[in-house]
Image (cartoon, rainbow, N blue to C red):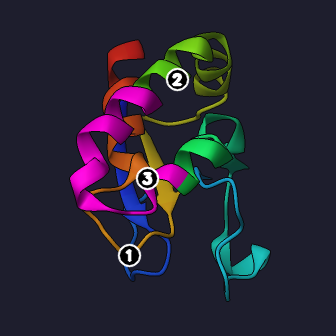
Amino acid sequence: MRVEFHRIYDDDPPAGYRVLVDCLWPRGISKDEANLDGHWKQLAPSSELRKWFDHEPDRWNGFRKKYLAELSENKGIARELLHKVSGNTLVLLYAAKDREHTHARVLTEYLEKLT
């Protein structure tokens, strides 16, 4: 299975099984418009971690390490959700503006190792 990530506000998302991986629903996007196959908020960073990171690039390495630790605690949930994916591409959708320092990038790496 291939795992990709894409900002939900951008045009031309890749085709595949589409899941939102943010805990919070993105502003200005209706459920119909989102056209999701799932909302995997269980794999989003904890509120505490998200608030600590606050999209500060200088905290990226610490965020990545802490988020991977959170994901490792939820490995069973991640595997269960992956079993629901139909097709060969999983598209992780997120809302953050920063495309480089996003939890979706870390989650992509984590899920690729599980498959």
Numbered circle sitting on residue 1: none
The amino acid type, in three-letter code, at marker 1 is: Lys
Callout 3: 10 Å neighbours few (<14), some, many (20+)? some
Residue 13 x, y percent position in the rendering? 40, 69
Residue 91 x, y percent position in the rendering? 45, 50
Q: Quadrant of residue 41?
A: top right
Residue 58 x, y percent position in the rendering? 22, 55
- Which residue is found at the position 38% from the left and 75% from the top? 97
Magenta region: which residues?
A: 52-67
**Mark 3 sits on what residue?**
53
Give the residue furthest to the right. Answer: 31
**Mark 1 sits on what residue?**
97
Give the residue furthest to the bottom. Answer: 28
Give left or right: position of 75 versus 7.
Answer: right
Secondary structure category for the residue under label 3: helix
Residue 59 x, y percent position in the rendering? 29, 49
Give left or right: position of 48 versus 17.
Answer: right
User: Between residues 22 and 91, which one lies in front from this camera angle?
Assistant: 22
Q: Is residue 66 above or below residue 59?
A: above
Give left or right: position of 41 versus 58.
Answer: right
Numbered circle sitting on residue 71: 2
- Which residue is found at the position 67% from the left and 28% from the top? 84
